[in-house]
Image: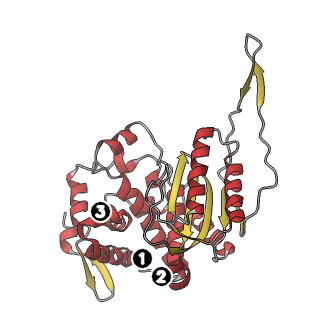
């Protein structure tokens, strides 16, 4: 893993181009079929220690059954939310992020973008247009202090993780919240089937009730909650998942389905495990997201999935433990 604590530029990158001639003696440039190694590169300009970030990401990677993606992550601080609130226009995640006070210098921003551009070089999956558009979006977010919290899947094996650290998280929240944020986004980067086409893509696009959003988000939240608990030698991660979902449902009501699919999705997956519909191991080692099981194995119209979606919120507190009510567990 290549890690940099502050911002610096890669020293050298060599790109080989093959020259060949066609029948008319015209010189044609062709790019060799390069298989880039699935490396992880992190640019960290937050106050969190890079050694800790490296340790936690390595631990998360070690839990995966396999990993194929190349991952570039940049972690940066942002200041106060600008008022009145301004949504940021971009090609990817248009209007999702909000403008904040920019804490990075322009030189630091340019250095991050240079690092990303160098990392893009030699990737046979990325067209020049796609690289240009991605870099334009990243520049926009950095220069406007976007509260980015996303994993951008540029290609099946090319992933960009963007994490903005707001003032609230830096100054008032426990370390566990940052760790959960970090591991959630990296779990998305480890998911292998996000760009799968064919029947998987067709089923995702055919229905508003598709499983993809709540299962991919729920899987990331489930994994991150479990691993943060392991890091801190806690064993109550299942209760914590249900606790978070319970209170989120209390706050948001039916809006939770759009607002926090990770929270209710993780609770729903916990209920699926209780019903024997999937194994916890497949979530924790990432194999659930190797071949689009979320759409190809789980029919969103099936009675079993409908029961899960109608029952995941049937949660009760018993002492300090949150658990499913008997109605949710009934088969």
Q: Which mark is residue 257?
A: 3
Which quarter shows the C terminus? bottom left
Marks 2 & 1, CB-CB < 8 Å contact = yes
Q: How is the image coloured?
A: secondary structure
Give me the C-alpha separation between circle 3 and circle 2.
Answer: 29 Å
Give me the C-alpha separation between circle 1 and circle 3.
Answer: 22 Å
| Identity of the residue drawn at 64% across and 38% down | 124
Marks 3 & 2, CB-CB < 8 Å contact = no
1 or 3: tag closer to the N-terminus: 1
The residue nearer to you, when weighing 257 against 235, is: 257
Residue beneath label 2, please?
Answer: 234
The residue nearer to you, when weighing 241 against 159, is: 159
Q: How many marks?
A: 3
The quadrant in which residue 225 appears is bottom left
**Badge 1 element:** helix
3 or 2: tag closer to the N-terminus: 2
Residue beneath label 1, please?
Answer: 237
Q: Position of residue 236 (x, y in %)?
A: 41, 80
Give me the C-alpha separation between circle 2 and circle 1.
Answer: 7 Å
Neighbourhood count class around disc 3 (C-alpha, 10 Å): few under 14, some 14–19, many 20 upward: some
């Amino acid at each position: 893993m290549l890690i940099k604590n502050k911002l610096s530029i890669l020293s050298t990158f060599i790109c080989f181009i093959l020259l060949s001639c066609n029948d008319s003696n015209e010189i044609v440039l062709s790019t060799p079929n390069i298989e880039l190694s699935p490396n992880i590169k992190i640019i960290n300009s937050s106050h969190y220690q890079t050694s800790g970030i490296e340790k936690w990401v390595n631990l998360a990677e070690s839990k995966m059954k396999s990993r194929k993606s190349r991952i570039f992550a940049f972690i940066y601080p942002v200041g106060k939310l600008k008022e009145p609130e301004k949504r940021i226009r971009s090609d990817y995640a248009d209007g999702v992020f909000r403008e904040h006070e920019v804490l990075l210098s322009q030189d630091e921003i340019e250095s991050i973008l240079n690092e990303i551009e160098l990392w893009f070089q030699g990737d046979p999956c990325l067209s020049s247009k796609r690289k240009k558009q991605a870099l334009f979006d990243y520049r926009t977010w950095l220069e406007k202090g976007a509260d980015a919290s996303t994993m951008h899947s540029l290609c099946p094996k090319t992933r960009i993780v963007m994490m903005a650290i707001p003032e609230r998280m830096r100054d008032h929240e426990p370390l566990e919240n940052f760790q959960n944020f970090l591991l959630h986004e990296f779990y998305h980067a480890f998911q292998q089937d996000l760009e799968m086409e064919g029947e998987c893509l067709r089923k995702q696009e055919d229905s508003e009730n598709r499983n993809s959003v709540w299962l991919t988000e729920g899987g990331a939240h489930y994994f991150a909650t479990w691993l943060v608990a392991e890091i801190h030698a806690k064993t109550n991660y299942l209760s914590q998942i249900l606790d978070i979902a319970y209170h989120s449902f209390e706050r948001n009501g039916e809006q939770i389905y759009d607002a926090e699919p990770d929270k209710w999705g993780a609770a729903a997956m916990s209920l699926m495990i209780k019903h024997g519909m999937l194994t916890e191991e497949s979530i924790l080692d990432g194999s659930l997201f190797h071949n689009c099981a979320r759409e190809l194995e789980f029919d969103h119209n099936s009675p079993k999935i409908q029961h899960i979606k109608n029952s995941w919120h049937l949660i009760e507190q018993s002492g300090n433990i949150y658990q499913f009510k008997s109605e949710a567990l009934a088969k």
